[in-house]
Amino acid sequence: MSTYKIGIIGAGSIVENNHVPAIRSSGGTFISWIYDKSPQRAELVSKMYGIPALSGEWENGWLEQVDVCLLATPYGTRPPYIDACRKARKALVVEKPFAFSTEEHSRHCEGFRPWQIAVNFQRRYYRSVASLRKMIRQQVFGRLNAIRFVQGNFTLKGGAGYLSSARLAGGGVIAESASHILDIVLLVTGAENVELSQLRSLRREGLDYDTNFDSEITAADTTINISCEISTLRNLENGLYLEFDDALVSCDLSPDGSILVRDKASRKIDFVLNDASPHETSRLQASAVNEAFAIFWEQFLDGLDRQEPNQTSATSSLITSAWIGQIYKKINTL
């Protein structure tokens, strides 16, 4: 693998706790600098990891020092940095949410080769996701007919910082958190198209707090109904619930979460799919969060080396942006 010099724009907790350790664990990388509009944040990460911190107003000339940029600033602040990387011909990894329409998604990708721009949907590499994907594609329990996705965690804190601004965050809990699972649903089903059918939402000033919506996924020669319940106002029984011809399956979607298989008639647990045996487990299946970040960076850099798009590439999540765009277009008209 070639040696890549990496610049980091944004010094939030996800960079501090996840991206920097993952980059450093991948071979052939050197973090040249970190920049944040908050000098205190940049200095903190700088001192923790010994990374040079840039200060002052952003300068496009800094990009001359690197081959790749990680862009981990709030959604609403990203366009100038994306444009700067495009003009400087630098590869780019962008945090989610990436875009709120197929048009915006495509604009961000313009000027980059498919393997040069990636979206950090690192949960795609969870071991539990690989198990669900295999189960669906091999029709282990027959055809998949319906999915229910539930994510609800009550909090009194509400939004803080950029999360309290729709302009900066792009949206509420769906954009900031649940978008990961929406992306996973599309991935494991092999979705070719998705259409929103109905939606109800509690929102304020462009931020969604409690939303129920139904959609229909088209995959190969089948359609799959999906209902979603996503909230920061209620504690819910979080997880993915899948209805197959011959079984009911549920998974909490932690990296190595157990998959419960139930009889359709009695709804009693028939058996639990824990993990594959060690000799069946791919090195691209993460059993911990930071391991997923490490695999993501390994795969992105491997794509750069080979000049081939892969599962990290922004082109592979265009349909995710399309679905999120439909959802927020409807929320914003309520």
Image (cartoon, grey):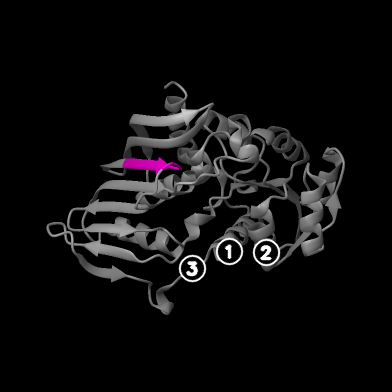
Amino acid at circle 2: Pro
Q: Is residue 140 left or right of residue 236?
A: left
For marks 1 and 3, give the CA distance.
9 Å
Residue 134 magenta-highlighted: no
Residue indicated by mark 3: 287
Locate residue 187, reporting x and y percent: 42, 49
Asked if the residue at tag 2 contacts the one at tag 1, i.e. Cβ–Cβ closer than 8 Å, the answer is yes
Give the quadrant of the C terminus.
Answer: top left
Amino acid at circle 1: Asn
Give the quadrant of the N terminus.
Answer: bottom right
Amino acid at circle 3: Ser
Task: Answer yes or no: is residue 317 visible.
Answer: yes
Residue indicated by mark 1: 290
> Which is nearer the eye, 194 or 73?
73
Secondary structure of the residue carrying tag 2 is helix
Residue indicated by mark 2: 21
